[in-house]
Image (cartoon, rainbow, N blue to C red):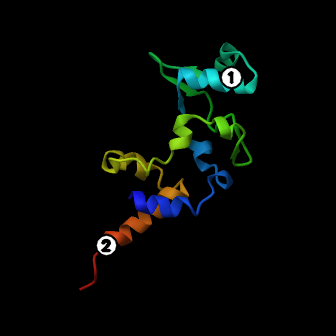
Amino acid sequence: MQKLNREIEAQIDCTKCGACCHQLMVNITEEESVETAEYLGLSTSDFKEKYVESGGGKLMIMNTIPCHFLKDCSCTIYEKRFTECRAFPNLDQPNFNSRLFATLIHYGMCPIIYNVVEQLKIATRFFKEEI
């Protein structure tokens, strides 16, 4: 999986797609809210009021889908994008089997996931051979 991901990811420019930014709910940390507020020249409280919805405990999510920071399929805060954004689609991480459901949910949205899964089918001989 990781080998296929490296090969496919190198061929796809996420900044030309932005599908994940159009469709995913993004969790952020307190530290990320402080850093992003500073990057945007806002106070942390103003940033949270404008962009964040708080859940129970420390859970914070961006308060709109698509993301506030998406413009023409590109992230306007790309250099400071959130950890979840940097990590998506997470195919380079170990324990792929534990994320299979989440990966397949995004199969039709993310060209990286789509192409990796299609190549994985070939590599594992997913399709039965005709007798």
User: What is the CA distance from the residue labelled 1 to the residue labelled 2?
Assistant: 48 Å
Residue 105 in the image, given as x and y percentages of width and height:
44, 49
| SS assignment at label 1 | helix
Q: Which mark is residue 27?
A: none
80 displayed left or right of 6: right
Q: Which residue is mark 2?
A: 125
Q: Look at the image and tell me in which quarter the N terminus lies.
A: bottom left
| SS assignment at label 2 | loop
- Of 86 and 52, nearer the camera is 86
The residue depicted at 58 percent of the width and 64 percent of the height is 11
Crowding at dot 2, Cα within 10 Å, few <14 / some 14-19 / many 20+, comes out as: few
Residue 104 in the image, given as x and y percentages of width and height:
41, 52
Q: Is residue 51 visible?
A: no
The residue depicted at 76 percent of the width and 22 percent of the height is 41
Q: Amino acid at mark 2?
A: Arg
Circles 1 and 2, Cβ within 8 Å, touching? The answer is no
Q: Is residue 112 visible?
A: yes
Q: Which residue is mark 1?
A: 37
111 displayed left or right of 80: left
> Comparing marks 1 and 2, which lies closer to the viewer?
1
Give residue 51's quadrant in the image: top right
Crowding at dot 1, Cα within 10 Å, few <14 / some 14-19 / many 20+, comes out as: some
Residue 57 in the image, given as x and y percentages of width and height:
44, 15
Q: Is residue 1 above or below residue 31?
A: below
The residue depicted at 47 percent of the width and 18 percent of the height is 58
Q: Amino acid at mark 1?
A: Ala
123 displayed left or right of 50: left
